Amino acid sequence: MLLKIYICVVFSVLIFQAGFSQESVKVTHLAPMPKLARNNWSLNFMYTDKGFGLGSNLYRSISNTVDVSAGIMISGVKDPNEFEQFDIFGNSYVPDKINRIYMISINVGMQKYIFSDELDESFRPLLSFGISPSLVLTDPYDKDFFKAFGYMNAGFAFGGYAGIGMEYKESNSVSLSINIRYSYIPVLVNDIRSLKDKTINDVGGIQLVFGLNFLK
């Protein structure tokens, strides 16, 4: 009789331990953390004292807080000393202007999100930096806009940029961003002139960049 009781007790203990072990595995098995939406590509608008431009960027995440990016920006460039005037017939002109200037920049860089742990996910400050090889094109100002393309000359500039900004997440698929950057892009090949006898040595400057970002 005692032997039967002992066997029953041992058997009950073994069943209890097996059940407890299974419950422990279920409790300690954590669900994976949801993936945060990050930039996939963007449309950008840039404004500077030298002109404005439109562009687009592609992004790739390399860590929880760092993205690498590559993109293109097409913009107009002018001398800060240009002033538009009007003749007696109401036609506009810029005194001493000899060329229209356009710039095509390839921007390759990185951006790092800061204070990610302290702030809400929808509001993300960031730092950015990178390089900007640029093709600078000029055509004669005294010729019609489209005809002047046939007289276009090319120069080359190379430099970099650094800035600070923020992103605001509108939804799981879209965010808005604003960045303030300083770029230094000296002209290396061919003289670039907008006004007569005034060479533009640096096609960079302070940039205000607005972005519409599509998330993944």
Image: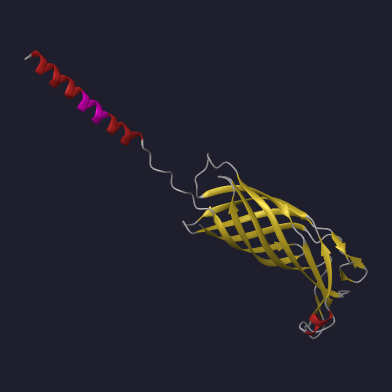
Picture residue at 71% right of the left edge, 58% below the top: 207
> Is residue 215 shown above or below 33?
below
Picture residue at 63% right of the left edge, 61% below the top: 57
Quadrant of image for the N terminus = top left
State yes or no: residue 18 in magenta. Answer: yes
**Looking at the image, which is closer to me, 63 or 193?**
63
The magenta stretch is 14-20
**Looking at the image, which is closer to me, 184 or 98?**
184
Indicate the quadrant where residue 146 lies. bottom right
The chief SS type of the magenta part is helix
Q: Position of residue 48 (x, y in %)?
A: 73, 61
Q: Residue furthest left?
A: 1
> Is residue 135 shown above or below 117?
below
Q: Position of residue 32 (x, y in %)?
A: 41, 43
Is residue 5 rendered to the left or right of residue 61? Answer: left
> Is residue 19 shown above or below 52?
above
Indicate the quadrant where residue 176 lies. bottom right
Q: Residue furthest top?
A: 2
